[in-house]
Image: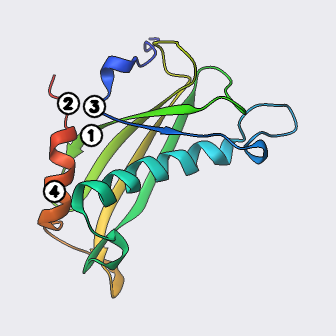
């Protein structure tokens, strides 16, 4: 079964990022590691803005428990990239995000990432926290896409 490519309408929150010369690899397309940096930036920039707080300083912090990326077409310097984000699930101590990367006018994503945050005690990261901080829950629930 072939899944269809994600489209702009599949996402709720948006951010535009600029590409840099160093983001491209020797073949002239965005380096794989940069995709993951973009996912991380989209999620954490949203959390900073939506909470109005430095999320690194909260008593409970989100650590990345899982990431993945589906690549559909090449993108790279010099055009900006639009990141679209949606939340698939808010659990008691975790959040599952999907982030689409778009470059140019295409309605179809060039790539889509899955990004899972699990909330842990900021002083003891080995210990998951239940429930996640209310300020985080309030920031991510508006991004839930209901079928």
Numbered disc 2: secondary structure: loop
Numbered disc 1: secondary structure: strand
In the shown orientation, is residue 92 left or right of residue 13?
left
Coloration of the structure image:
rainbow
x 60%, y 40%: residue: 18
The picture places residue 55, in percent across and down from the top left corner, at 32, 69
Q: CA distance from mark 3 to mark 1?
A: 8 Å
Numbered disc 4: secondary structure: helix
| Residue at numbered disc 3 | 12
| Residue at numbered disc 2 | 145
Please name which of the two marks, 3 or 4, marks the residue nearer to the observer.
Answer: 3
| Residue at numbered disc 1 | 87
Which class describes the residues within 10 Å of circle 3: few (<14), some (14-19), or many (20+)?
some
In the shown orientation, is residue 18 left or right of residue 132?
right
- Identify the mark nearer the N-term, 1 or 4: 1
- Identify the mark nearer the N-term, 2 or 1: 1
The picture places residue 28, in percent across and down from the top left corner, at 82, 31
Q: CA distance from mark 2 to mark 4?
A: 15 Å
In the shown orientation, is residue 136 left or right of residue 17?
left
Q: Quadrant location of the N terminus?
A: top left
């Amino acid at each position: 079964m072939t899944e269809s490519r994600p489209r702009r309408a599949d996402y709720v929150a948006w951010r535009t990022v600029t590409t840099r010369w160093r983001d491209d690899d020797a073949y002239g397309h965005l380096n794989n590691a940069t995709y993951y940096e973009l996912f991380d930036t989209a999620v954490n920039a949203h959390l900073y803005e939506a909470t109005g707080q430095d999320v690194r300083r909260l008593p409970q912090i989100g650590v990345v428990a899982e990431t993945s990326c589906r690549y559909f077409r090449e993108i790279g310097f010099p055009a900006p990239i639009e990141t679209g984000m949606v939340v698939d699930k808010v659990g008691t101590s975790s959040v599952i995000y999907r982030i689409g990367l778009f470059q140019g006018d295409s309605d179809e994503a060039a790539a889509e990432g899955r990004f899972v945050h699990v909330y842990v005690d900021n002083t003891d990261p080995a210990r998951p926290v239940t429930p996640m901080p209310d300020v985080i829950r309030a920031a991510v629930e508006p991004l839930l896409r209901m079928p």
